[in-house]
Image (tube, helix red, strand yellow):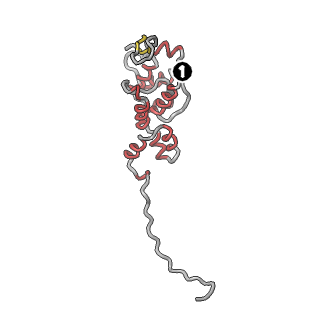
Amino acid sequence: MMMGTTTSSPPQPQQPTRQQPGFDTLPPELLSKIFSYLDADFLACASGVCRLWNEMANSDVIWKHLCATRFPLLRHQPLDLHPRADYARLTPTLTVKEMKGILARRHVRIPRGAVEKTELVQLVKDTKPAGGPRGAWTGKWKSTYIVAELDVGRTRLTVQEFATTHTWHPAQQASLPHPTIAKFQPDG
């Protein structure tokens, strides 16, 4: 063997590379189930990973589930879209029943008779409550979740909200520490 020369073995044929299984190979149902265990912060982070994750993290099914689990004190009430959210950009995704529910919770009188969807869309756009949270969110349930989360920290009602929310009456609460303190509940 001479100095300075190297012997090399003949080139080996390359083995075919096997693609490692990843999240993109999972069925959508399984991905949806995995994403349903994430909270809002993790969903926000996951939405920036790739297009598939963004689509999954912004799914109305995931956010509706999150709305139902995040606010356990409201479990006895029907799960409705939040009336203070701005649905102007999301009206194509709203059903007639959902639009009527939003308008009812905004205390908007809907004309009797056959009302077309286009009229309801216009009413939803025209009646967004003043002072509501601003934002252009990607889904109706994500919008509901964000507005409800912001409402958790609210300490004030507008005069319009107080006057049009419900007929209020005091109801003594047995679990309250002082008998002079009353919790207000809507009538009905």
Which residue position is annotated with label 1? 155
Residue 58 drawn above or below residue 117 = below
Q: Is residue 87 visible?
A: no
Name the quadrant of the C terminus. top left
Return the residue found at the far bottom.
Answer: 1
Q: How many marks?
A: 1
Q: Tell me residue 139's x, y (percent).
A: 47, 34
Q: Tell me residue 183's x, y (percent).
A: 44, 15
Which of the 4 image quadrants contains residue 101?
top left
Residue toward you, 183 or 53? 183
Residue toward you, 176 or 155? 176
Q: Is residue 15 left or right of residue 155?
A: left
Looking at the image, which residue is at 37% across and 24% down?
A: 77
Residue 184 drawn above or below residue 7 = above
Looking at the image, which residue is at 51% across and 34% down?
A: 137
Which of the 4 image quadrants contains residue 94?
top left
